Image: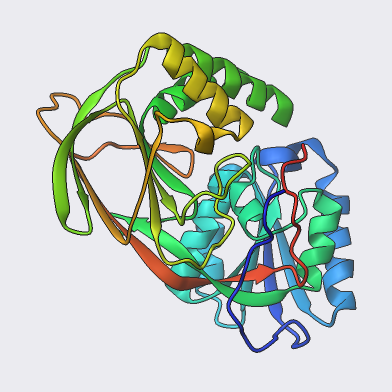
């Protein structure tokens, strides 16, 4: 069973009324499949019942950044409650970090990995209950060339999977998950490889790798890759050298099934500072940050930022987060 997240001791703040700005992306994640007006009303009732003040904005995806900028400038807003896909949550986290606001995560994405790290229920109604009665905590984030990420930066196989998956049409969360599995099996059967100058806390060496992932805290054991302990203050570094097709498919299976920690071909290391530089690369490899493809640069300097982001966390975190 996965461990419940462990948080440092903070003065409880859940009973202090908070001014909350909720942002619901009607085009993102599972929110586009529900009655979002009814959902917004439910959020309002549950937070107001706990004594909080809440303003709720329902926006289209192309209004997301403009709305986040406005919320970031609102000095009365203490907490940004964000609902949408993983891209919505990462964008909201960036603005919360920059404006010193707390982030509340409504788990409406495909995998909801950061919500799992926080111990939030994955059912939307249960998550709102947990957030409305939750407390503020400080958790780690990571940065890559100054850009915040909550989960991971990936080079190689994962970006290729995302590109293949995004070429398909998905009408539901489950179709998107199935598309990811199909893309993963295709990618791992014909892997790429890169020559990378990798520096861990100042110790540099050159490695030929088919994948490298740097995560915001180490992955927990016995489940899909996400951190159990969001305040450990270290980056997880996961890599694999070019492998035969059969070994690659075994690695893909272990990553999808959550048995990655038993695979001998996946190397796990830790560091507080990681530098990735692509050697002799005519074309910069694809990169994903929190599952979103980004413009590739020749070098990424990645740092852990201990307890740099305030979040709403459940008073009693969930201990099992792998239900669908």
Q: Which of 213 and 39 is in front in this view?
A: 213
Q: Where is residue 120 in the image (x, y as percent from the top left)?
A: 72, 58
Q: Quadrant of residue 289?
A: top left
Residue at image position (78%, 68%) is: 316
Q: Nearer the viewer, residue 248 or 111?
A: 248
Q: Is residue 241 visible?
A: yes
Q: In this view, does 64 lie above or below 169?
A: below
Instruction: Decide if residue 118 is on the left or right side of residue 199.
Output: right
Q: In this view, does 47 lie above or below 152?
A: below
Q: Is residue 63 visible?
A: no
Residue at image position (55%, 28%) is: 254
Instruction: Decide if residue 52 is on the left or right side of residue 206.
Output: right
Q: Which of 288 and 266 is in front in this view?
A: 266
Quarter occupied by the C terminus:
top right
Instruction: Decide if residue 208 is on the left or right side of residue 291.
Output: left
Residue at image position (74%, 68%) is: 314
Q: Where is residue 192 in the image (x, y as percent from the top left)?
A: 31, 18
């Amino acid at each position: 069973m996965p461990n419940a997240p462990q948080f440092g001791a903070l003065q409880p703040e859940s009973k202090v009324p908070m001014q909350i700005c909720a942002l619901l992306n009607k085009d993102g994640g599972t929110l586009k499949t529900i009655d979002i007006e009814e959902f917004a009303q439910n959020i309002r009732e549950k937070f107001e019942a706990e004594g909080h003040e809440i303003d709720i904005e329902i926006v289209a995806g192309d209004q997301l950044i403009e709305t986040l900028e406005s919320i970031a400038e609102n000095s009365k807003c203490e907490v940004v409650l964000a609902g949408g896909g993983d891209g919505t949550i990462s964008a909201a986290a960036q603005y919360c970090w920059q404006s010193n606001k707390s982030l509340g995560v409504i788990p409406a994405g495909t995998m909801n990995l950061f919500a799992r790290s926080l111990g939030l229920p994955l059912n939307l109604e249960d998550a709102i209950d947990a957030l409305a009665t939750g407390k503020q905590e400080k958790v780690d984030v990571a940065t890559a060339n100054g850009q915040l990420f909550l989960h991971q930066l990936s080079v190689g196989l994962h970006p290729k999977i995302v590109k293949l998956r995004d070429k398909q049409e998905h009408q539901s969360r489950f179709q998107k998950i199935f598309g990811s599995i199909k893309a993963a099996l295709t990618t791992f059967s014909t892997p790429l490889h890169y020559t990378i100058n990798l520096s861990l806390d100042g110790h540099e060496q050159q490695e030929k790798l088919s994948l490298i992932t740097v995560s915001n805290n180490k992955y927990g054991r016995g489940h899909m890759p996400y951190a159990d302990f969001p305040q450990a203050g270290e980056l997880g570094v996961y890599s694999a050298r070019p492998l035969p097709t059969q070994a690659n498919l075994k690695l893909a299976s272990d990553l999808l099934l959550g048995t990655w920690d038993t695979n001998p071909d996946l190397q796990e290391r830790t560091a507080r500072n990681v530098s990735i530089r692509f050697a002799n690369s005519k074309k910069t490899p694809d990169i994903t940050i929190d599952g979103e493809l980004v413009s590739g640069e020749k070098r990424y300097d990645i740092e852990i930022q201990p307890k740099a982001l305030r979040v709403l966390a459940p008073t009693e975190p969930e201990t099992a987060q792998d239900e669908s």
